[in-house]
Image: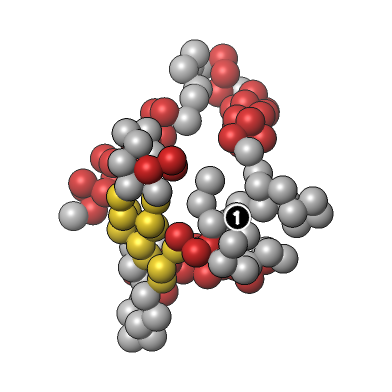
Amino acid sequence: MVKWENVDIEKDTDKESSKLPVRLKLGKHQTKTKKSRVVIGRRGDVFNRVKIYSKFTKPTDFIFTDNDTREPILRDRYYTNWRFLIKSIGFDKVRRDNSFYPLRHSYCTWRLQGG
């Protein structure tokens, strides 16, 4: 789980908002390989938008936090919502593997195609 102190968004006002670079600094306890790393992306605007709607934006607050309880939103809630969405659109009848994992490959493919 990532806290606001782990996020560094470039504040370049000349750039299109969807291209604001963002750096996520992940500690070794946050990665699968147990090695610290910095992840760089282009959608700093998304983090800025989350910050607008969140009640908890101090550096030590988690980014994805329940606005009522201040508790971090855990992975189980995402999976529960994902399964509900897949079932409600009938996609569970079309494909058996409806996990988040294929989305990772979709994202990588889109990034490669986009240059």
Q: Where is residue 103 in the image (x, y as percent from the top left)?
A: 41, 34
| Residue 51 appears left or right of 31 | right
**What is the crowding at mark 1: few (fewer than 14 residues within 10 Å), some, or many (at least 20)?**
many
Q: What residue type is labelled 1?
A: Phe
Q: Is residue 45 above or below residue 89?
A: below
Q: In this view, does 23 lie above or below 88?
A: below
| Residue at the outermost right position | 68
Is 102 in front, or is 40? 40
Is 89 in front, or is 32? 32
Q: In this view, does 92 lie above or below 17?
A: above
Q: Is any atom of residue 18 visible in this view?
A: no
| Residue 113 appears left or right of 13 | left
The residue depicted at 26 percent of the width and 40 percent of the height is: 109
Quarter of the image that includes the C terminus: bottom left
Name the secondary structure under disc 1: loop
Q: Is any atom of residue 40 visible in this view?
A: yes
Q: Position of residue 21 (x, y in %)?
A: 33, 68
Residue 49: image quadrant is: bottom right
Is 65 in front, or is 44? 65
Q: Name the residue under label 1.
A: 62
